[in-house]
Amino acid sequence: MLVLVYRLNHQKTSSDKVISPASVNIREVKLTNMNHWVISEGTLEGQRKACLSFDRSDTVVYIGKTKQGGDLREGSMVFGPGDDLSRGQLLAQIDHREVISKIAALEAQLLSAKNRKQEATARRMLAMNEVDLAKQTLQRIEHLYQQGLTAQEQREQADLKVKNAEMLLTSATSQINIATHDVQQIKAK
């Protein structure tokens, strides 16, 4: 009986005890890349199929290589620009010799057009000088004509020289405009 009283007494005292809370650790969570391997069997299919096209038709002179060294074919995996590459993988190249020769010919035409413009500018300067000289001559002859010291024919010749010089000036100006247009057109090509 003593044991039973002891036990009952002991159970009362143990239920009156206060239980302390469990300790909790707080940690900061950061986003990071998770890297793990998954091994499985199956078929891998590409997400997107892209067709290769060029901006002009010509002969293909180079076909790219795979990482294993074989020629690229339909379904081959290719890579784009990465940290070590300024461009993506070269897939194919067309013959560009004809384009290079056309560019060289256009550069020669451009140089010729620039020279024509420079010559026309020089001719315009000469024509402007001729107009000024012819007008000065006409003024002198006009002054002499009014005093009766020169003939009407000399006055008419001086007037004709002014008109001819002005025509040369107009022609030189139009040559500059034509040469400027040619330069712009060749640059556009």
Image (cartoon, grey):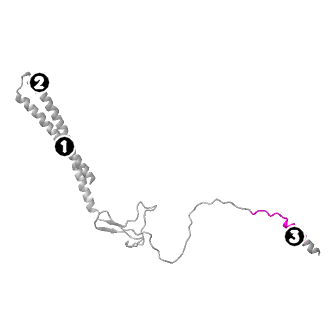
Left or right? Give the position of 55 relative to 80: left
Quarter-of-image position of residue 77: bottom left
Q: Which residue is mark 3?
A: 11
Q: Amino acid at mark 2?
A: His
Q: Residue 174 got which mark? A: 1
Q: Quadrant of the C terminus?
A: bottom left
The magenta segment is 8-22
Left or right? Give the position of 128 relative to 77: left
Within 10 Å of disc 1 (Cα), the crowding (few <14, some 14-19, many 20+) is some
Q: Secondary structure at mark 3?
A: helix
Give the mark, 1 or 2, whose residue is nearer the N terminus.
2
How far, Cα to Cα, is label 2 from label 3?
146 Å
Observer-nearest residue: 31 or 62?
A: 31
Badge nearest the viewer, 2 or 3? 3
Observer-nearest residue: 8 or 153?
A: 8
Q: Amino acid at mark 1?
A: Ser
